[in-house]
Image (cartoon, grey):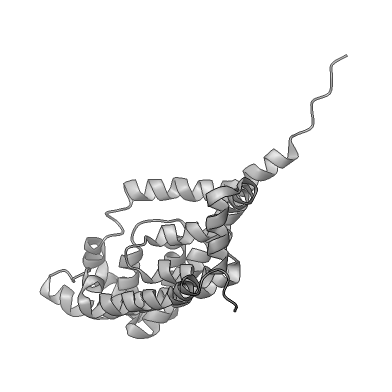
Amino acid sequence: MTPSPEPPNTPRHGRLVRRLPILLIALVAIAGAVFLRDDLSFSALSHNHARLAAFRDAHYPLAAGTFVAGYVGLVALSLPGALIATLTGGFLFGLFPGALFNVFAASLGAMLIFWAARAGIGTDVAARIDRSGGAARRFREGLRANEWSFLFFIRLVPVVPFVLANLLPAILGVGTARFAISTALGILPGTLIYTWLGAGLGAVFARDTAPDLGLILQPEFLIPLLGLAGLSLLPWLIKLWRGPGAGA
């Protein structure tokens, strides 16, 4: 008599299903970095700016919806070109509502990759850290005590890659509400700067030049951003100064 097949390993199958979105995102991100870098560059925006502006003038609501949807997908799939998308939002829609579109789209895209990463690997990694004890668990417990400072710091410091700032909170078990709020508020200063730069691209294209994309690293912009990042760490520094035995 032929034995009946063994039942499927449900827990293992469930983990695979949960990890599928983040695995697909990783594959798309790699493919995008290889094949789409030139298509999501400033040169591509410069080459197509007239057609984009004409489409916006003829179909403004459709152009706005298409831009936001495209920006969300770009961030959610970790494709290159988020900075160019922000500049495009400023070029097409001005400082306002361009900044609003940019912050909303970038935040929503970040939320999508955060959810995918937390479901795929974040929950398992957080559980392993809790079980492991030692330095990793102490680090996570310290993070939980200073989550707001950590979240705002990684958003406000210009050198922290946007993708990493989306993945780290998911892996470390940050709550959804805190991630969403800190993302929207944390990216706002930098987004305003680059949206404002994008709003002036019409003159740049007329001169057939390129904008200074390192603008955010110039002292008049970098110092306020670093000041905000320092303020985000202030609660943690106060706790450190007062010591672990200090009262609330």
Q: Is residue 65 visible?
A: no
Q: Position of residue 236 (x, y in %)?
A: 48, 72
In which quarter of the view is residue 51 placed? bottom left
Q: Is residue 169 left or right of residue 175?
A: left
Q: Is residue 164 visible?
A: yes
Q: Is residue 217 above or below residue 26?
A: below
Q: Residue furthest bottom?
A: 96
Q: Position of residue 221 (x, y in %)?
A: 26, 78
Which residue: 35% across, 81% down? 93
Which residue: 11% across, 75% down? 207
Q: Is residue 120 left or right of residue 182?
A: right
Which residue: 12% across, 70% down? 208
In which quarter of the view is residue 11 placed? top right
Question: Residue 147 versus residue 65: which sits nearer the camera?
Answer: 147
Question: Residue 78 versus residue 139: which sits nearer the camera?
Answer: 139
Q: Residue furthest top?
A: 1
Q: Is residue 141 above or below residue 223?
A: above
Q: Is residue 153 above or below residue 2?
A: below
Question: Residue 201 versus residue 212: which sits nearer the camera?
Answer: 212
Q: Position of residue 216 (x, y in %)?
A: 26, 73
Placement of the N terminus among the 4 image quadrants: top right
Placement of the C terminus among the 4 image quadrants: bottom right
Question: Residue 120 versus residue 146: which sits nearer the camera?
Answer: 146
Q: Position of residue 182 (x, y in %)?
A: 49, 73
